[in-house]
Amino acid sequence: MDLRRVVRSRRAGTVQGLSPHIVMGENDAAQCLSGWSVRAQQLDRCVRWVGHTARALLQLPAGATHVGVELWVPPGIDAPQFARLTLLDPWVGNLPEFGPTVDVSFRLQPGRWQVLECPLPAGGVGEGETELQLQVGCDARRGPVSRLLASIAGRLFRRHAAVRRLWLRGDRLAATGVTIIVLNWNRPDETIDCLESLQRADLRGARVMVVDNGSSDDSVARLRARYPDQHVLALPENRGYAGGNNAGIRAALDAGADAVLLLNNDAAVAPDFLPPLLWTMNSHARVAAVASAIVRQGYETLDVAWLDIYFGHGLVHRRGVNALPGEGFSDRREVEVAVGCSLLLSGEALRAIGPFDDAYFAYHEEVDWCYRARQAGWQVHYQPYSRVIHGGSKSTAALAEPLQGERAESSADQLPNALPLSWNPIRTYLGARNAVRFVRKHGGLRQRLYFVCSSLYAVPLELLAVVMRREEDLMLGLWTYRRALSLFAFGPSGRVSAATLLRTPWRLAVDLPRQIRAAHRAGQTAQLVEHCRGLWDGLRDRPLPLERLRLR
């Protein structure tokens, strides 16, 4: 179908009988598009120069909550920059003093299909026939030369927006269509506490499934004895966070679930944690995932809010660590990566994108999934009104050897609400290996070179932090080569004298290697060793050493 030709059609028509709970599919596109007429006209100051207006008559059904359109605008100097959706109230549409019911503007991304969707007023617009207008045009704030060239290009080529779908819909997801998956591996006490918090929560008919990840203890027997009616899916072996949750996702979708909520077994949910996730999932047709705010157990601060991918050493930036929600993390927003501790995933998105990549086993699998979802045009959101209390990576923390020696107090300015940070060599190994896997899978040449260079820069800096007991400074981003050299050569006071300058080469050549050997013998470099081993194994694409890590 030539979409641009259809969009230019001047045939009048009415889209009748749209179900409020069904998004129109491709088979309905021709009927929908035939109701559009397009003509060029001078637009207002928000969108102008190369402007087009499309109109459609819609028959509003009862229960419609959102109106949306999927369109494409061509790239080029005359490409429209903004789109505006206007919906007139069927009862007062002929009375201009009342204004439109819906009037929303969007920024466009030329050269790709995109979904524009906005909610209808909470009170509804009433049933009946109404007119929907779509206006697209260029930014009036362009410079005079850009506007002149855009105007010439528009007159020469007369390129229009292409519309693929138009729809009215109600809520995509109800609580009864959600299956909550709790993954257990040799931690029945934490899983029971998590299930207890779910029993106290307002689940509104959501179902709960426990997936036992091949536990070697009596977890399955204890869970079934404590909760006889609880659905427990017992796996024959430990498949990690990715494989275990994938088994639960497949079982839930096969049973008819519309969405799955992945919940760590060492987390306790607030009684009202589920409704805000549903609100966000229902806010737009392309929301693939919504994450809760993860709060540290015993504190009011965030464990983490969301993650940003930067393809450097460590792969992601953790946002909101140790922060209070009011310090910039109290509003719902679209993010790059949602944290997997409490994560609601759309069934539609899971069927389109697929589940987690089993090869990650644990850590960074949600980074990979969210990246694939966003590349496919889906959205990922953070919802702070949904709160989950997290105990902190207990499945692998129990296997880690404690670091020896006391850590030095940081003399630099600290973040507010500073709290002790966790150290876990096994988690570090998996994170490093999977970071390399992610870069190899999704990164281009530039991203790969950047990851290698940043790792070569960061690993020696981590070693200096270990030797000088400054891991907290490193984790908080306060540790640099300049600061390390200053502390090592001149001490905390930072005073420079002729004697210290003369001793510096000797200390760097003799004292520093001696301290590195001492730290390694004391077991203080265990985490750094696992980090380097994870980078190397990821580079060579070696299979996971599950037996050595005591994960199977």
Image (cartoon, rainbow, N blue to C red):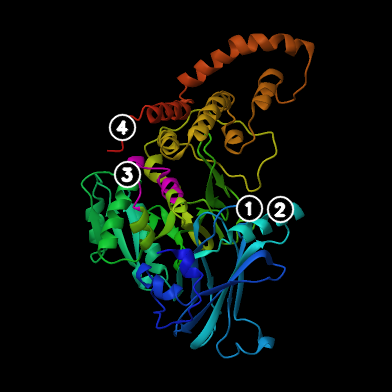
Inter-mark Cα distance, 4 to 1: 49 Å
Mark with earlier residue (2, 4): 2
How many numbered marks, from 0 up?
4
Mark with earlier residue (2, 3): 2
Image quadrant holding the C terminus, namely top left
Magenta span of residues: 354-371
Q: Nearer the viewer, mark 1 or mark 3?
A: 1
In-front residue for pair 4/393: 4
Q: Which x, y percent locates residue 296?
A: 52, 52
Image quadrant holding the N terminus, namely bottom left
Identified by mark 2, the residue type is: Ser
| Mark 2 vs 1: CB contact within 8 A | yes
| Mark 2 vs 4: CB contact within 8 A | no
Image height of 213 relative to 210, above or below: above
Circle 3 sits on which residue? Answer: 358
Inter-mark Cα distance, 4 to 3: 12 Å
Q: What element carries label 4?
A: loop
User: Can residue 124 be seen?
Assistant: no
User: Can residue 159 be seen?
Assistant: yes
Circle 2 sits on which residue? Answer: 146
Image height of 100 relative to 272, above or below: below
Inter-mark Cα distance, 2 to 4: 54 Å
Q: Which of marks 2 and 3 is in front?
A: 2
Q: Which x, y percent locates residue 130?
A: 53, 84
Circle 1 sits on which residue? Answer: 77
In-front residue for pair 245/140: 140
Inter-mark Cα distance, 1 to 3: 44 Å
Q: Nearer the viewer, mark 4 or mark 1?
A: 1
Residue at image position (72%, 56%) is 148
Circle 4 sits on which residue? Answer: 543
